[in-house]
Image (cartoon, helix red, strand yellow):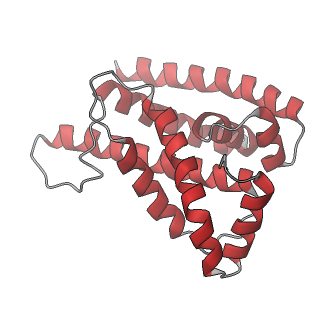
């Protein structure tokens, strides 16, 4: 969203929420660029020879977001939060599907999105992270939201604070506590699998 100010994006999101189709037309290139930036960030953790296509991840997340036309967008940070959740769901669904297919031991027909290559270890880590985030959300929803916004959404502490209507210091404190908690939970999951 580098070509438009956060206020411009917020105005377009609000107009789209109210049914203005021209707002969506203006917003689409801005949204696509931001989704691509987020997807590229996710793909940095992949092995160098992976065949995961950033564009396919962006397209799947974009399709899910366009279906969110009933969402009453608050601002750019809110959009990024929902985008982060959409990408998390796409990646986790794909990882779970891969894990299921490996257990079945059969070849199955899959969609183009499911055919994206993700390493087995990355898939397992992503599923473990998702499980840990789900558990964290049950204990402390805000800490889970902080992780989603910072890790999956790439938001700064200030942007996260704006989205959650808390101070940046609260975000940083929640971020530290959540990371420690998540690492401990993921470690338990790994130990439990052995």
Q: Position of residue 148 (x, y in %)?
A: 63, 41
Q: How many marks?
A: 0
Q: In this orientation, does residue 109 appear?
A: yes
Viewed as shown, does residue 83 lie left or right of 8? Answer: left
Give coordinates of residue 5: x percent, y percent. 76, 52
Q: Is residue 123 left or right of residue 41?
A: left
Using the rendered view, name the quadrant where residue 29 is placed.
bottom right
The correct choice, above or below, for 150 with respect to 94 in the image is: above
**Residue drawn at (44%, 50%) of the image:** 58
Tell me the residue at 72%/37% (across/down). 143
Q: Residue at x 52, y 54 (%)?
A: 32
Would residue 155 be found to the left or right of residue 165 on screen?
left
The residue positioned farthest toward the left in the image shown: 106
Q: Is residue 113 above or below residue 120?
A: below
In the image, taking residue 192 as reference, residue 154 lies left or right, namely right
Instruction: State which quarter of the image contains the C terminus.
Output: top left
Percent x, y of residue 56: 35, 50
Q: Residue at x 43, y 17 (%)?
A: 191
To which quarter of the image does residue 155 belong? top right
Position of residue 62 relative to residue 45, above or below, is below
Residue closer to the observer: 50 or 173:
50
Residue at the front extreme, as displayed: 3
Q: Would you identify the image quadrant in which residue 169 lies? A: top right
Give coordinates of residue 42: x percent, y percent.
48, 34
Query: Can residue 74 be spotted in the picture?
Result: no
């Amino acid at each position: 969203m580098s070509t438009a100010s956060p206020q411009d994006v917020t105005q377009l999101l609000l107009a789209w929420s109210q049914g203005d189709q021209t707002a969506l037309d203006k917003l689409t290139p801005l949204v696509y660029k931001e989704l691509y930036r987020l997807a590229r960030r996710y793909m940095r953790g992949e092995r160098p020879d992976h065949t995961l296509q950033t564009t396919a991840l962006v397209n799947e997340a974009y399709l899910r977001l366009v279906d969110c036309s009933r969402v009453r967008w608050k601002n750019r940070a809110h959009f990024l939060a929902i985008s982060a959740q959409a990408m998390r769901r796409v990646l986790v669904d794909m990882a779970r599907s891969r894990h299921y297919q490996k257990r079945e031991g059969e070849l199955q027909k899959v969609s183009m999105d499911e055919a994206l290559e993700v390493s087995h270890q990355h898939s397992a880590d992503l599923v473990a992270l998702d499980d840990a985030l789900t558990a964290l959300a049950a204990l402390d929803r805000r800490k889970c939201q902080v992780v989603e916004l910072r890790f999956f959404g790439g938001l700064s502490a200030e942007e996260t604070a704006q989205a959650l209507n808390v101070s940046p210091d609260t975000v940083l404190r929640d971020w530290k506590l959540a990371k420690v908690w998540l690492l401990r939970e993921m470690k338990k999951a790994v130990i439990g699998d052995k």
